[in-house]
Amino acid sequence: MNKLFLLGAVVLALAACGKPAPIESVESLVADPARLKELRARCKADHAKVGDAQCNAVAEATRRRFMGGGTPYTPAQAPAPEALAAQDKAP
C-alpha cells in the first residue's frame, strides 16, 4: 500500500511538471495584427487562463504598434543666425 501511494505521488508530480505553453514573442505579435487582436481579446476575457507572461507580451506589442519603434520625436534644428544673415545678403 505504501509503495502504491509513493508511485501515485511520483506520477502526479511528473504530470504537474509538464511544459508550459510557448509564449509568442512581442516581435511576432507586432508583425501579425490579427493574432495580436485575438490574444488581446483572450487576455481581456480570461487573463488567468492565458497567463501573465503572454498578456504582458501582448500589452508590449500593443504599445509598440501604437507608439512606434520608440524613436523619440526630435524637432528640426533651427538654422544658425549666421546662415540666416547669409541668406538675406544673397541676391
Image (cartoon, rainbow, N blue to C red):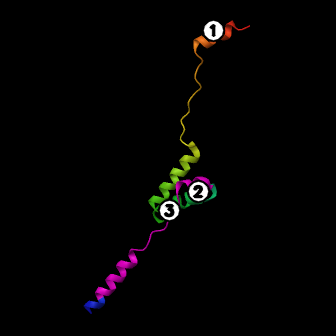
Question: Relative to residue 57, is residue 34 drawn left or right?
Answer: right
Quadrant of the image containing the C terminus: top right
N-terminal-most mark, 2 or 1: 2
What residue span does the magenta drawing correspond to?
5-32
Q: Say above or below: 14 vs 71.
A: below
SS at circle 2: helix
Q: CA distance from mark 1 to mark 3?
A: 59 Å
Q: Give the residue drawn at x 33%, y 86%.
A: 8
Question: Relative to residue 84, is residue 26 drawn left or right?
Answer: left
SS at circle 1: helix
N-terminal-most mark, 2 or 3: 3
Q: CA distance from mark 2 to mark 3?
A: 12 Å
Q: Callout 2, which amino acid?
A: Leu
Asked whether 28 falls inside the magenta stretch, the response is yes
Pick whichever, 69 or 15, lies toward us.
Answer: 69
Instruction: Report which residue position mark 3 lands on.
Output: 23
Instruction: Report which residue position mark 1 lands on.
Output: 85
Quadrant of the image containing the N terminus: bottom left
Q: Give the residue drawn at x 51%, y 52%.
A: 59
> Label 2 neighbourhood size at 10 Å, few (<14), some (14-19), many (20+)?
many
Instruction: Report which residue position mark 2 lands on.
Output: 36
